[in-house]
Image (cartoon, coloured by chain):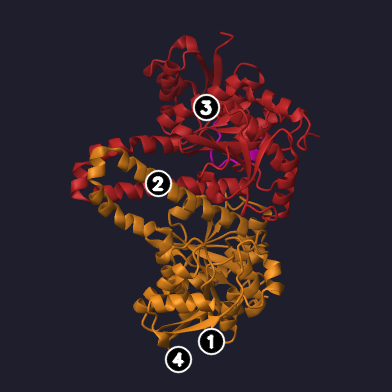
Chain colours: A orange, B red
Amino acid sequence: MSTSIRLAIDVMGGDFGPRCIIPAVARSLRQIPDLYVLLVGDAEQLASLCNKHRLPSGRIRCIPTTQIIHASDSPASVLRRKPDASMRVAIEQVRDGHADACLSAGNTGALMVLSRSILGTLDQIERPAIMAALPVAGKACYLLDLGANVDCTALQLVQFAVMGSEAARELSGLQEPRVGLLNIGSEVNKGSQRVREASELLRQHASLNYVGHVEGDGLFRGDADVVVCDGFVGNVVLKASEGLASYMQEELRQALTANLLLRCLSPLLRLALRPMNRRHDPGCYNGASLLGLKGVVVKSHGGADEDAFTAAIDRAAQAGRSNLPQHIARRLGSAGPGSP
Amino acid sequence: MSTSIRLAIDVMGGDFGPRCIIPAVARSLRQIPDLYVLLVGDAEQLASLCNKHRLPSGRIRCIPTTQIIHASDSPASVLRRKPDASMRVAIEQVRDGHADACLSAGNTGALMVLSRSILGTLDQIERPAIMAALPVAGKACYLLDLGANVDCTALQLVQFAVMGSEAARELSGLQEPRVGLLNIGSEVNKGSQRVREASELLRQHASLNYVGHVEGDGLFRGDADVVVCDGFVGNVVLKASEGLASYMQEELRQALTANLLLRCLSPLLRLALRPMNRRHDPGCYNGASLLGLKGVVVKSHGGADEDAFTAAIDRAAQAGRSNLPQHIARRLGSAGPGSP
């Protein structure tokens, strides 16, 4: 069992809860032979669904909890008032060495606050960040922060760059990921004081492959493998991109079904468009990493369906296997403005 | 001639200069019967191109200039070193009452600095803002600021809201445009200190139809007619949206031409997709307004082709006709936190 990958999953999080998560776990257990899952949540629902979906008893363990963290719960309140919440207990499995990674589709703010409190932040990191992958030309462009830090100092942006670079190396297998700083122009004098300061620090950083400023459209031209920004900008850009992509897909669907002849050809069209849709399905890229913690925590989209949650399990398993926190800690111990 | 609309156009700006702008002007003169154009730029090129495209001599006037503002010119340097730049002279036509609006596809920073210096800022406005329309479901969603102000105070964001609301009323004919504040969550406690303060001021503002926070995906769900944010966020979101839209269009084109049968059907597909493409062609929405000045200035995309520049002429003519600065000044004179 020592070489297997052990995942603690908060089955009560997300819009669809265990009804969506348990079938996704069943599928992942078939696809990942050395996966072992700790299912954390309501005992009764777990028993019934594990039975229904025939989860192999030797590769799962159910950890019963009695409390649920809701989307409306304030991050501060969950720290004190919900000691037996499924999300908390799932994170504790990582802290106690029972799991290599934790996965939840619940309240992002609560997940971050609980993770910081239970696992702690890496010594050289001021604030953890949330990182996700944008699908660009069949490759991942990692963007961080996505909302954990509304305002960031220049030094924090540099720390994000180091974490993102290490994560891209581990998750995408890139030797020297190209790191860019999101900005409103390519010239060095562009952007806020903070962004200009970060740009200067990044340029001096010996161990980063810094490629300079990346503008909004550069995100979708593959100008960098990792793009760094504060959490306000990152969150708005990510959500705007998701919103625009699904809006355009719906427009396309309507355009293609408005024409009678094209409706007859729809099986052919669906077939032709399938590779493109698959390359850009946000579900395939589901699973954001909380970076800078002393343990692996992955956040699934709250609205993830079975397919998307399966993708998040893949991502969490990969992150858990790579032991990303250790790599980041080692990298930050090396010389550079990001180190203390 | 008193009821005609008079446009001063900087023909030397943009990636393609007069070769693209003069044919666009020719087309606009055919489409807008009461349009009168002051063409500002190099005398020789103007003479040759006006002749070639048979511009009606009674409806144009050429104003020869000897200097050009380049994309690489710093906004500060253009103030002092280029007294005979086409962009400057075009703006001066508005100041001197010879034109109702000025249009340029040149350096945005220079256009803003020159406009502020030559026309001046409205009394109640701290900083002008740049506003453009995102095409959403065949309607315009106005977004501002788009890069004139990297950092904004809460009060400036409120001023943007008032200017945007008035502009949407004039340009889209909406009686009570819904105004939203771009943020990373819908709850009142979300976002930076500055954004929370702006939200509070906007809620108290009697004359605005304020609908609260709009998230990134809300931009493309039509959650508001006007969305307000600082220039850093707005610039990144606008460019990311443009980048993603053209990336997805290219992906679609490739997917549809990869299949032999679909290649044979391509005339039909083009026909079916034409309304959708037209509704989302960024060119159709070309023409950003510089709001808060004592005159109408419109910025065309630097890479605008003939179609897109024609759209910008339409926009500038419409803005010039409505006398937007007067409406904004009147609105700001009324009670509300935006007034002094």
Q: Is residue B4 left or right of residue B327?
A: left
**3 and 4 marks on the same chain:** no
**Residue under label 1:** A98
Q: Amino acid at mark 2?
A: Glu
Start and end of the magenta stretch? B68-79
Q: Amino acid at mark 4?
A: Ser
Q: Are marks 3 and 2 on the same chain?
A: no
- Asked if disc 1 and disc 3 are in contact, CB closer than 8 Å, the reply is no
**Residue assigned mark 3:** B315
Other-residue count near label 3 (Cα within 10 Å), few / some / many at <14 / 14–19 / ≥20:
many
Q: How far across and down, in percent of the image, does residue A318 sit?
A: 44, 76
The answer to whether marks 1 and 2 mark residues whose Cβ atoms lie closer than 8 Å is no
Label 1, label 2: how far apart the Cα atoms are: 43 Å
Mark 2 lies on residue: A250
Please, is residue A176 above or below residue B211 in the view?
below
Is residue B77 covered in magenta?
A: yes
Q: Residues within 10 Å of mark 2 (few under 14, many from 20)?
A: few
Q: Residue shown at 61%/16% (left/top)?
A: B98
Q: Amino acid at mark 3?
A: Arg
Tag shown at residue A2: 4
